[in-house]
Image: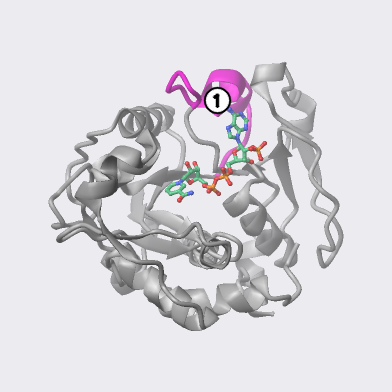
Amino acid sequence: MEEAGVNLPAAAAAGIGRMLVLGGGYTGRRCAAALARSGVAVTVTHRQAPQPTAAAGGPIPWLAFDPARGLLPDADALRDITHLLVTIPPDPEGRDPVLTHLGSLLDGLPLRWVGYLSTTGVYGDTGGAWVDESTPPAPGLGRSRARLACEQAWRDRNLPLQVFRLPAIYGPNRTPFASLQDGTARLVHKSGQVFCRIHVDDIVGAVLHNLALPASRRPGTLIVADAAPCPSSETLGFAAHLLGLPLPPAQRYEQIEGSMSPMARSFWSENRRVSSRLLQEQLGYRLRYPTYREGFRASLAEEMGATPPF
Ligand SMILES: NC(=O)c1ccc[n+]([C@@H]2O[C@H](COP(=O)([O-])OP(=O)(O)OC[C@H]3O[C@@H](n4cnc5c(N)ncnc54)[C@H](OP(=O)(O)O)[C@@H]3O)[C@@H](O)[C@H]2O)c1
C-alpha cells in the first residue's frame, strides 16, 4: 500500500507528547493516520461521528468539535496537547472557528508546534507568473482575504506556528476519474490558464518532514505544491488515457462561463504558478508525486481497491 511509506522517524515521533488534528476531513484524516502509524498519540476532531474504518492499529480517537451545535471539547480533553494541526477553513463569516471557540483553551496548552493548512489563493491572480513564500499576498477573492486574516490571527498568537499554503488538493477519490466515467467531466480551454495542485500524501509528507526538522529550521510560511502547474485539459486528458475513455468535446471557457457555478468561475478567475522550491531544495523534502501523472496513477490504484490506510 503506497501510502504506508509516509512516516515520521521514531526520534521525531518520540518528541511529540500528544497531537490534536483539528478537522478530520480529507487531509486531516490522512495526516492523523500517518501520525498514528508512526507511534504518535493523536486525536482528531469531527463534527459528526466518523464512519467506522479498517484503520491499521484501530480507529483514531476523536473529539466532537462543532461550534455551530455548541459541541466543544473541554479543557480536560485537551490538557496535554503539545502539537496542533489545524485543517479547518474559515467559517462563513470569515472567522477562524478554532481561535473563535477554543482560543482561550489554547492559551493554557504546552504547545510546541502548530501547523495551519491555508491556501495559495492568498497570492491572488498573477496572470500565470510564479509566486513563492517571498511574494507578498494579494488576495483577490473574498474567501482568500478571509483566509489571510485567519492566518494573521494565528500569527498574532505568537505560537510556534507553521502556515502551509496549498493549491488544489487531489488524491484517491479526489480525481477526475468519476466524472469521466459518469459523463459529467468538461474539457475546458482558456488561453494561458494553468492550475497548481498537490497530492494529499505530499501534504502529509511535508508536514511530517517539517516535524522531523529542528524547530529552528521550520519556516513560518511554506508552499506545498507539486512541480507541474498545467491546464486542466492536460490533467483530464491523462486521466482519460489511464481509464481508456474518450475525452468529452473541448469547450472554450468564454462560451461556457455563464453556465458555471460562481465557485467554479472563481477558480478560473485566477491564474498563478506556485513554487515549492523552499520545501524541496532548502528543506530537502522529496515529492512523492512530483506531477499529476504519478499522483493519478497511484490514486487510481487506490480507488480501484488497494486497501485504504484508514
Ligand atoms: N480542497 C482543496 O483543494 C484545498 C486547497 C487549498 C487549501 N485547502 C484547505 O486545506 C484544508 C484541508 O483541506 P481538505 O480538503 O482536507 O478539507 P476538508 O476535507 O473539507 O476537511 C475540513 C475539515 O474541517 C472540518 N470543518 C469545516 N468547517 C468546520 C467548522 N466550522 N467547525 C468545525 N469543523 C469544521 C470538516 O468537518 P466535516 O468533516 O464535518 O465536514 C473537516 O473535518 C482546509 O482548510 C481547506 O480549506 C483545501
The answer to whether one can see residue 284 in this image is no
Image quadrant occupied by the C terminus: bottom right
Callout 1: helix, strand or loop? helix
Residue drawn at 63 percent across, 32 percent down: 109
Q: Relative to 249, is 244 on the left or the right?
A: right
The answer to whether one can see residue 265 in this image is yes
The quadrant where residue 1 appears: bottom right
Q: Position of residue 158 (x, y in %)?
A: 41, 32
Compared to residue 101, the image places residue 258 above or below, namely below
Count how many numbered circles sit on residues in the image: 1
The quadrant where residue 45 appears: top right
Q: Position of residue 43 (x, y in %)?
A: 74, 45
Q: Relative to 269, is 235 on the left or the right?
A: right
Q: Relative to 229, is 60 on the left or the right?
A: right
Compared to residue 281, the image places residue 23 above or below, namely above
Residue drawn at 32 percent across, 67 percent down: 233
Q: Is residue 31 magenta?
A: no
Q: Relative to 268, is 192 on the left or the right?
A: left
Q: Is mark 1 within 8 Å of ligand 1?
A: yes
Report which residue position mark 1 lands on: 97
Residues in magenta, as a range:
91-112
Taking the image in four quarters, ligand 1 sits in the one at: top right
Viewer-nearest residue: 119 or 32: 119
Label 1: few (<14), some (14–19) or many (≥20) C-alpha neighbours in 10 Å: many
Viewer-nearest residue: 239 or 289: 239
Q: Position of residue 151 (x, y in %)?
A: 38, 34
Viewer-nearest residue: 159 or 63: 63
Q: Is residue 106 magenta?
A: yes
Q: Amino acid at mark 1?
A: Pro
Q: Position of residue 98 (x, y in %)?
A: 56, 28
